């Protein structure tokens, strides 16, 4: 299971996935889909798109990973998790095949999601890539639209250690003749996407060249953003998001361009549905862990930021958030290069180094040792619960406590 043990569980081909879905009668052909990849933001973008489709009245499937608390979070229809009895029945049904081909946890989960969406007769499914793109188990669909949010440094041991190499893996979801939205234009990666889109005759759009966040403001639990189609235009639309992290402005631009292209393909996504969906993403889809306030006085915020780009956005958010002292509960996994992320974290904070209860977790003493070389000081705690308890005990009413560094640390809270 990749979530627990890391790259040892990664299958570098689609053979098992194809055998599974053929055994199931190719369920992925029985519903339209949108395919979402990217280093950061693909989870938020997927949930935003699902919320918009739900607001527009479509029966909407949503496949994401990893889960925070319950496995069934990965597979939802209209915000409701997959039924437990379906999970049990599915595993029993594929047992004759799975015992002979030994599929990975992720391969089985993808096949389960596609089968469930077909059985539930969804109008559309938003499918988030698990890792990379080209060889990801989800990459057997032919979607209505492909979306790649951005490219950053993550999973370099599997995807490559340069931005163009990582972009090449993500570009693997671009399909013949299917439009593709790239969230962020970057000089190192744009040529990779342009070449692949050209080869596949796929219309290519860079979202940040079509729309601009003219202004934004942060109102405690919401983000208010003014979006324009030109830096010089007076024609602005105001959107209110219940995902308050300022980094969501980038995802918003990507989502709006995706909705625009989907509307051109005949999907009835009105401005009203877009506004309603964006304002109620958490309620409609059950998204957690994106600058999520879970306690006040002191404020305790959960954020799944765990790599260089994610931590950079998190630090920016901390800077614009009113607080006195800063406390950071930090746990990370041991099979990634975490130096770039550690280098960005503020040395002024007091740290509570810990580890999630999974084999992949970097031991808290080793994390503290690496962090010290970047001027980050604090104590170690053997569990997330103890670390958070200690941070809250020290924090006063106007202080800020952040829990970050790993999806698994946030999941435990």
Image (cartoon, rainbow, N blue to C red):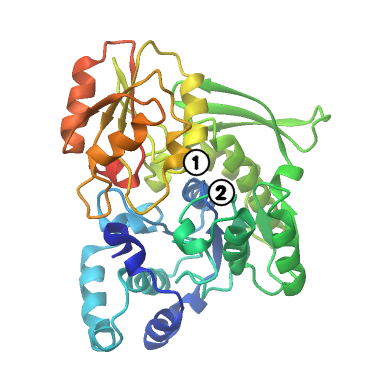
Q: Which mark is residue 308?
A: 1
Residue 292, percent from left and from top: 38, 32
**Location of residue 265 (image quadrant):** bottom right
Q: Secondary structure at mark 1?
A: helix
- Which residue is at 64% across, 52% downward? 258
Is 254 rendered above or below residue 34?
above
* Between 6 and 208, the one nearer to me in the picture: 6
The quadrant holding residue 326 is: top left
In the picture shown, does residue 184 fall above or below 18? Answer: above
Cβ–Cβ below 8 Å for labels 1 and 2? Answer: yes
Query: Circle 1: is it few (<14), some (14-19), or many (20+) Cα within 10 Å?
Result: many
Q: Up-down: is 322 above or below 359?
A: above
Q: Measuring 44% from the left and 29% from the top, which residue is drawn there? A: 345
- Is 25 situated left or right of 397 in this image? right
Disc number for residue 152: 2
Let me know if residue 235 appears in the view: yes
Q: Tag 2: Cα neighbours inside 10 Å, few (<14), some, or many (≥20)?
A: many
Which percent across, then down, holds residue 407?
34, 46
Residue 413: in sight, yes or no? no
Locate residue 90 relative to residue 209 in the image: left or right. Answer: left
Residue 177, numbered circle: none
Q: At 57% across and 65% down in the image, what residue appears?
A: 169
Per the model, the C-alpha gap separating discs 1 and 2 is 7 Å
**The N terminus lies in quadrant:** bottom left
């Amino acid at each position: 299971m990749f979530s627990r043990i890391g790259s040892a569980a990664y299958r570098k081909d689609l053979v098992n996935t194809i055998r599974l879905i053929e055994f199931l009668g190719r369920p992925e052909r029985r519903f339209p889909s949108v395919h979402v990849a990217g280093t950061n933001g693909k989870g938020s973008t997927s949930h935003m798109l699902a919320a918009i489709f739900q607001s527009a009245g479509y029966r909407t499937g949503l496949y994401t990973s990893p889960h925070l608390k319950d496995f069934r979070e990965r597979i939802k229809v209209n915000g409701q998790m997959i039924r437990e009895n379906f999970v049990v029945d599915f595993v029993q049904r594929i047992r004759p095949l799975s015992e002979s081909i030994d599929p990975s946890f992720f391969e089985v989960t993808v096949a389960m999601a596609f089968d469930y969406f077909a059985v539930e007769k969804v109008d559309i499914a938003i499918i988030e890539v698990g890792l990379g793109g080209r060889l990801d188990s989800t990459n057997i669909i032919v979607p209505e639209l492909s979306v790649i949010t951005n490219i950053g440094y993550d999973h370099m041991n599997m995807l490559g250690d340069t931005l163009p190499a990582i972009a090449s893996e993500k570009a693997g979801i671009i399909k013949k003749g299917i439009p593709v939205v790239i969230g962020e234009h970057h000089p190192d990666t744009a040529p990779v996407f342009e070449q692949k889109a050209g080869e596949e005759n796929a219309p290519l759009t860079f979202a940040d060249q079509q729309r601009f966040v003219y202004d934004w403001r942060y109102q405690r639990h919401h983000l208010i953003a003014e979006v324009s189609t030109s830096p010089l235009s007076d024609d602005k639309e105001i959107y209110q998001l219940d995902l308050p992290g300022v980094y969501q402005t980038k995802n918003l631009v990507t989502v709006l361009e995706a909705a625009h292209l989907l509307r051109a393909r005949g999907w009835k996504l009105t401005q009203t549905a877009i506004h309603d969906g964006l304002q109620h993403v958490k309620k409609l889809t059950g998204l957690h862990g994106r600058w999520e306030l879970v306690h006040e006085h002191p404020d305790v915020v959960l954020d799944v930021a765990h790599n260089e780009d994610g931590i950079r956005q998190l630090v920016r958010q901390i800077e614009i958030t009113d607080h006195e002292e800063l406390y950071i509960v930090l746990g990370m996994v041991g099979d990634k290069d975490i130096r770039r992320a550690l280098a960005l974290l503020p040395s002024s904070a007091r740290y509570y180094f810990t580890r999630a209860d999974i084999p992949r977790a970097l031991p808290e003493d080793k994390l503290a040792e690496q962090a010290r070389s970047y001027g980050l000081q604090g104590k170690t705690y053997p569990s997330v619960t103890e670390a958070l308890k200690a941070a809250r005990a020290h924090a006063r009413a106007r202080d800020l406590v952040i829990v970050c560094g790993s999806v698994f640390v946030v999941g435990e809270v």
